[in-house]
Amino acid sequence: MTSKVQSKPYSIVTYLLLLLLFVSSVKAEQTTRLVVLAPDLAQNLIALGAAAQIKGIIANPRLEQQLPGAEVVGDHQLLNFEKILSIKPDWVIAWQGGNPESQLRRLESLGVRLLRVKTERLEDFPAQLELYGELLGRQAEAEELIQQFLSEIDRYEVKTGAEVRLFYELWHSPLMTLNDSSWIAEVFTLCGATNALGNAIEAYPQVSDEAVLAEDIDLILGSSELPKNWHDKWRKWPQIPAVAADQIYTVNADYLHQLTLDTVKGVEQVCQAVEQARRFR
């Protein structure tokens, strides 16, 4: 039996009011003015489709090309408060643990709304996108990017087999590496490698050549930010397994040092190098 009860149609006035509220909401979301204090945070906002809302950035050649209309408001360590205030941002998005906390507190004291974003582990990337989606009314776009990232990361499972001991050269003078606290070391684990100096107390410790020589390193990776001939110094120590097997590779710092969608490309580079080194075990 067909029910005679039907939903009552909205009046034309109600439809117009709903349309007005929707348009006002979209307009507010699209006009939210942002100042972004780290390149990777800005890249993730660009990926989300919010490039036009970024009105201020820190000095970075790539960003300055991508966002020619954005004001440069300083660098990682020194911010231009006057310029930031002149932009009249709705939000300043900062890198928690990267931008100096004293300067961030100063911005807050000037009445600026500040959003601190954490980028320590791989899981922080989806959380960051979710936060941006809520802030800018771009939840659907954020969810699409999150699923893209997670599906690509899931392709790389922790490998089993012979242990591959890895040394990562972050910088050459002084010689620096990283411990197991960052997402970069998490990538090493994901690819089935052991960060040979991962137990260091400091996040980015200075180490000696002797410390590396003592570790039986199977694979040496270096950042693309190093001098082009960075690997030459290691070749004078053929007793290092990685040197004897010619397992010394450069990885793209833009992929590995910034937590963005491109991090997946960094994972691929590391995993390929680990698999190659494992063949010599």
Image (cartoon, grey):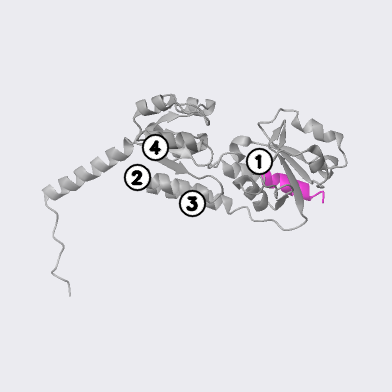
Element type at mark 2: loop
Element type at mark 4: helix
Residue in front for this viewpoint, 106 or 270: 106
Q: Earlier in the sequence, mark 3 or mark 2?
A: 2
Mark 4 → mark 2, Cα distance in angstroms: 24 Å
Q: Earlier in the sequence, mark 1 or mark 2?
A: 2
Residue 26 shown left or right of residue 84 in the figure: left
Mark 3 → mark 2, Cα distance in angstroms: 18 Å
Q: Nearer the viewer, mark 3 or mark 4?
A: 4
Q: Earlier in the sequence, mark 4 or mark 1?
A: 4
Q: Is residue 280 magenta?
A: yes
Element type at mark 1: loop
Disc 1 packing (10 Å; few <14; some 14–19; many ≥20): some
Q: Nearer the viewer, mark 3 or mark 2?
A: 2
Q: Which residue is mark 2?
A: 137
Mark 1 → mark 3, Cα distance in angstroms: 31 Å
- On screen, 163 above or below 53? below
Q: Earlier in the sequence, mark 4 or mark 2?
A: 4
Q: Which mark is residue 147?
A: 3
Residue in front for this viewpoint, 115 or 163: 115
**Residue type beneath disc 2:** Gly
Q: Where is residue 112 shown, x and y percent of the image? A: 36, 35
Can I make out residue 270 in this image?
yes
Q: Where is residue 195 shown, x and y percent of the image? A: 71, 48
Can I make out residue 138 in this image?
no
Q: Which residue is mark 4?
A: 108
| Segment colored magenta | 270-281
**Residue type beneath disc 1:** Tyr
